[in-house]
Image: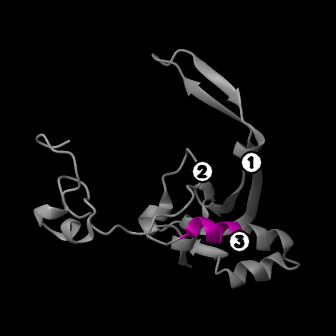
Amino acid sequence: MHRGHDHDHHHHGNGAGAQSGLAGPGHNHAAEPRAVAQWHTPHLDHHHGDDRAQHGEADLDLVESAFVEGFAAAADPTSFLRLARVPFAAAAPDGTRLVLLRVETEAVTDVGAMTPHLGGESFRYDPLPAKMVTRRRRLRFIYRGADGLHSLTFAQVRALAEA
């Protein structure tokens, strides 16, 4: 209801919303076109930020999933790493020389959810129904540098410079 009348505002004639008959955000303004949104949100490691946003690679989580599947089935893991352009020796952003020691994959299945109560001192726990259970794999590349071991994500490895 708007100032005593309740109907579409296509007759106001201001902007693209008027031509299409659809009002966007605000009063009779067409919505700005938005970038395509990805249909699922990957689970993020709490120890690292979202490197995908920093590197701007579309669907990097899907590429990472394909890497995990292919790597697990590869008869020759070393050649698979070469095909995927994973460096065996690289320079970290701070200049540290890194060498690849190990590739780790971990299967993770979320079967429960917690909701904190007001104040945060207690919480509610609910087991998830089968349709809401999520499964994913975590992928880490373990490199050795002069200062110790480095556990890198797929996105971080893609950003490494070959040594």
Given contact means CB atoms under 8 Å apart, are the residues at marks 1 and 2 in contact? yes
Task: Tell me the kind of residue under disc 2.
Answer: His
Describe residue 100's horizontal placement relative to residue 37 as left or right: right
Quadrant including the N terminus: top left
Left or right: 115 in relation to 107:
left
Q: Mark 2: few, some, or many residues within 10 Å (few <14, many ≥20)?
A: few
Q: Specify which label sits upstream in the sequence, 2 or 3.
A: 2
Q: Earlier in the sequence, mark 1 or mark 3?
A: 3
Residue 73 or 104: which is nearer the viewer?
A: 73
- The front one of 89 and 155 is 155
**3D distance between C-alphas at marks 1 and 2:** 10 Å
Taking the view exactly as shown, the residue that stands out farthest to the right is: 75
Q: Amino acid at mark 3?
A: Ala
Looking at the image, which residue is at 55% across and 46% down?
47
Q: Which residue is mark 1?
A: 108
Which sits earlier in the primary sequence, circle 1 or circle 2? 2
Secondary structure of residue under mark 3: helix
How far is disc 1 from disc 3 in space, using C-alphas? 16 Å
- Regarding mark 2 in the picture, which secondary structure is present there? loop
Q: Secondary structure at mark 1?
A: strand
Q: Residue 122 placed where, x, y %?
A: 57, 16
Rendered residue at 79%/78% (across/down): 78
Q: Which residue is mark 2?
A: 43
The span from disc 2 to disc 3 (Cα, nearest Å) is: 16 Å
Which residue position is annotated with label 3?
66
Q: Position of residue 148 (x, y in %)?
A: 62, 54
Magenta stretch: helix, strand or loop mostly: helix
The amino acid type found where label 1 is placed reads: Val
* Residue span colored magenta: 59-67
Q: Give 136 or 97, whichever is nearer the viewer.
A: 136
